Structure formats: structure tokens, C-alpha cells
Image (tube, rainbow, N blue to C red):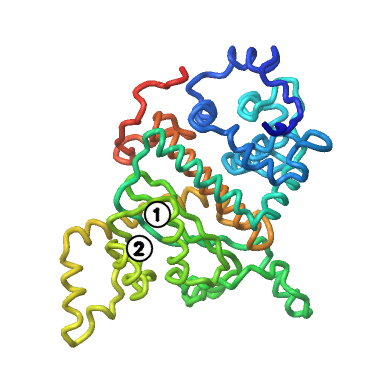
């Protein structure tokens, strides 16, 4: 049997650890559910290999899962890494979730910087993708059942650059602040100028793109492919499908907007026995020959119509990610670091969703009335209560 890694003592299990927390923290708190539903400690075995010496030599490091949880919470609460380090110092529920005793000092924010560097040094963040997949598999083992329809789309994130200063840099012949950020063009919009006259203005900015697949039945994100901002949706679909396939996802159909109405995509899915229910481009039925008949028949298919109406399912996590978890704007510079942000953001969304599906516990108060979502949690009572 090989030697086990050594970690810094966090005081867990002491009088100032579990005993005090057990008297204070309610068992139906969101972070309690999050802690109990997933095997977080197993992730240390995966992450310790990112450390030189694997925790066997030198000064004992903090448990890698502790730093991962801190990074996770910074996205959950949409705060900076400095702020989450402060919360880990003073916020009791956060300290408990991290495995710190009440009196134990929290890691400094600079430890998170080094932790991210380790993630990037290992196959450009492959460990984070593996962790994303593992938590999804754990949810399935707990009883979350994926459906038969996958919805695909992409979401843009603005680069961490000031557009005005960027133009000044270009005018001075200086390189861009973020060379990886591509120019994203989002079409045109009508605005009112200084004289009160309407005019058309092109929407463009530098940024990145996440190509995403969502299970329509559960709302869980199964695949995240971060790319440069100018990568077309149909060009990234092959990677999206490949990752879904690695997870063992074999849906009845894929649906998406007209950007995915691509002959190569349709042929690829047909080979796998999967229907391509992408919204058709207008040119499909404008033809004057008999070739348009197959497209008219698909439009008349009730299953196609039903699948097309489910495209909104992919927009829900996009809106939540931008509104509550900071995906509107990049935290870091460069595509590799954007990949960390994208995967962590959608991991947070998945964890929130999984906790809700399994227990009914939500991170924020539920919507009521017609906006409420009717569902019955997998667990009738909390297994750890």
C-alpha cells in the first residue's frame, strides 16, 4: 500500500469543528444538502496529482478539495476570490462546508491563484472537465434521470477589456490586452442618436463563447465547450456531441436554432440513429423543386414541433449564469482561464439544479404562482436529517 498524501490540519472533528456546527447549522440548509449529496473528498484524490510531490514531500498543502470548494463558492455567491477568502474566515456555514473548524484560519486568496495555475498546467484544465463529469455521474447514481432530448446553443462572454482603451492601444500600435478574445458580432440594433433620430448600430465586442448541451427533461448542462468568440455554432457541434457520447448520452434527438441546421450535423446524427430536430433555415422550404418536400414533412411532424418548443430550456441556464453568477463578463484573461470560468459557472448551475431535483432545497426562494415549476423531488425526506 502506497503512502497517503499529508494535508494541513483544518480542525475538522474537534470541539471547534463538528460539535459547534451541529448545534448551529440547520440540516436543510442548501450548503448542507450540497455537502451530503456529493462525494467531495474523493475529488482530493484526483486533484492532488496536480501538486508537485502529490502531497508526499515538502510542507503539507491544504486539501485540494478545500481550495476547489472555495473556488466553487466564489461562483455560487458571485464574489471575487478575495471576498470568498474573507467569507471563509468569518461565515460559519461557509467554514463548515469547506471543512474548517470555527477557529481554523482560511486559506489566503493567493492560494486560489496557485490552485488555478495548477489546473491550467494539467492538460489545460482537463481535471476540471473530469470533475464536472464526475459530479454529473454522481447525480445520476443518486436517481436523477436524463431525458431523451438534448438542446444545444452557445452563449457569449465579454472579454475583460475596456473597449475604449483597447481602441487607444490599437491606435498606438500596441498588442491587444487579451489576444485570445475574438471579435463577436451580434447583428444590429436600432438606437436613438443625440438628435433624437433612430439609427442602426452594429453590436460587436471582444469575447469568448461557450457551446453548451442541456438535457431538456432536467435542465442539467451535460457539455461545455469553451472557444474563441468567432467559432461558429455548427463547427463546435462535433465536440459537443463527442463529449455527450463520452458520458454515455444517447438521446432520441437534438434540437437547436437554425445555426445548427447543417447537412454535416444531420448526417452525423443519422449515423448514430439520432434525429436532428434543429430549426430549419428558411432556404430549406423556399426551393422550387421536389427536394423541399422532405423538409415540409419534418415541419408537419408533431414530434419535431414539440422538440422545437423545448429550445428555451438552454436559454434558462444562460440567463441564470449571466444574471447571478457573473458569466456576462470574463473574470480572467485568455481562453484557458475563460474555460475555468465557464466550467465552474455551469458546474454551479448543475449543483443547484441537482440539489433541487433530489431534495427540493433551493439556493434562492422559489418562484410562486404560474412561474413556479411543478416537480416532485426524488427524496421524500432528507437522508441525512
Residue under the point 47% across and 48% down: 320
Residue under the point 34% across and 23% down: 380
Nearest the viewer among 152 and 82 is: 152
Seen in the picture, residue 331 relative to 379 is either above or below; the reply is below
In x, y percent, where is residue 121? Answer: 70, 55
Seen in the picture, residue 274 relative to 356 is either above or below; the reply is below
Count of numbered marks: 2
Give the residue furthest to the right.
58
Q: Is residue 296 left or right of residue 121?
A: left
Residue at the disc numbered 1: 314
Q: For residue 191, say whether it is visible.
A: no
Residue under the point 54% across and 72% down: 230
**Residue 212, quarter of the rendered image:** bottom left
Q: Earlier in the sequence, mark 2 or mark 1?
A: 2
Contact check, label 2 and label 1, Cβ < 8 Å: yes
As measured in the structure, the alpha-carbon distance from the residue carrying label 2 to the one carrying label 1 is 9 Å
In the rendered structure, find residue 256 and report the number of the disc placed on it: 2
Image quarter in which the N terminus is found: top right
Q: Secondary structure at mark 1?
A: helix
Seen in the picture, residue 233 relative to 151 is either above or below; the reply is below
Give the residue furthest to the bottom.
288
Residue under the point 51% across and 75% down: 201
In x, y percent, where is residue 136? Answer: 46, 43
Mark 2 burial class by Cα count in 10 Å: few <14, some 14-19, many 20+ = many
**Residue 86, quarter of the rendered image:** top right
Nearest the viewer among 373 and 28 is: 28
Q: Is residue 103 left or right of residue 323?
A: right
Nearest the viewer among 292 and 57 is: 57
In x, y percent, where is residue 344? Answer: 57, 48
Q: Secondary structure at mark 2?
A: strand
Give the residue furthest to the front.
1
Amino acid at each position: 500500500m502506497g503512502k497517503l498524501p499529508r494535508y494541513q490540519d483544518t480542525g475538522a472533528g474537534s470541539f471547534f469543528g463538528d460539535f459547534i456546527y451541529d448545534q448551529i447549522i440547520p440540516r436543510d440548509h442548501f450548503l448542507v444538502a450540497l455537502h451530503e449529496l456529493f462525494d467531495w473528498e474523493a475529488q482530493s484524490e484526483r486533484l492532488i496529482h496536480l501538486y508537485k510531490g502529490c502531497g508526499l514531500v515538502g510542507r503539507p498543502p491544504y486539501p485540494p478539495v478545500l481550495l476547489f470548494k472555495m473556488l466553487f463558492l466564489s461562483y455560487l455567491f458571485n464574489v471575487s476570490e478575495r471576498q470568498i477568502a474573507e467569507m471563509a474566515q468569518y461565515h460559519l456555514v461557509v467554514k463548515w462546508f469547506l471543512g474548517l473548524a470555527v477557529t481554523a484560519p482560511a486559506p489566503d486568496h493567493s492560494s486560489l491563484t496557485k490552485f488555478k495555475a495548477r489546473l491550467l498546467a494539467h492538460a489545460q484544465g482537463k481535471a476540471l472537465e473530469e470533475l464536472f463529469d464526475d459530479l454529473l455521474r454522481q447525480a445520476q447514481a443518486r436517481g436523477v434521470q436524463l431525458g431523451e432530448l438534448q438542446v444545444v446553443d452557445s452563449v457569449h462572454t465579454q472579454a475583460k477589456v475596456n473597449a475604449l482603451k483597447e481602441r487607444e492601444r490599437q491606435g498606438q500600435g500596441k498588442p491587444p490586452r487579451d489576444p485570445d478574445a475574438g471579435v463577436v458580432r451580434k447583428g444590429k440594433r436600432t438606437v436613438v442618436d443625440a438628435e433624437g433620430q433612430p439609427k442602426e448600430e452594429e453590436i460587436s465586442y471582444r469575447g469568448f463563447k461557450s457551446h453548451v448541451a442541456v438535457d431538456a427533461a432536467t435542465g442539467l448542462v451535460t457539455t461545455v465547450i469553451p472557444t474563441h468568440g468567432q467559432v461558429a455554432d455548427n463547427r463546435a457541434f462535433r465536440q459537443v456531441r463527442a463529449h455527450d457520447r463520452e458520458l454515455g448520452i444517447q438521446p432520441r434527438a437534438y434540437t437547436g436554432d437554425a445555426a445548427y441546421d447543417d447537412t454535416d450535423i444531420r448526417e452525423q446524427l443519422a449515423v448514430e440513429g439520432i434525429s436532428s430536430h434543429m430549426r430549419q433555415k428558411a432556404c430549406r422550404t423556399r426551393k422550387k423543386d421536389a427536394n423541399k418536400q422532405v423538409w415540409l414533412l419534418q415541419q408537419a411532424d408533431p414530434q419535431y414541433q414539440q422538440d422545437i418548443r423545448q429550445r428555451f430550456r438552454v436559454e434558462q441556464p444562460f440567463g441564470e449564469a449571466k444574471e447571478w453568477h457573473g458569466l456576462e463578463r470574463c473574470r480572467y484573461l485568455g481562453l484557458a482561464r475563460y474555460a475555468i470560468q465557464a466550467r465552474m459557472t455551469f458546474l454551479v448551475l448543475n449543483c443547484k439544479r441537482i440539489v433541487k431535483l433530489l431534495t427540493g432545497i433551493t439556493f434562492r426562494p422559489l418562484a410562486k404562482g404560474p412561474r413556479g415549476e411543478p416537480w416532485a423531488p426524488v427524496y421524500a425526506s432528507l437522508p441525512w436529517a
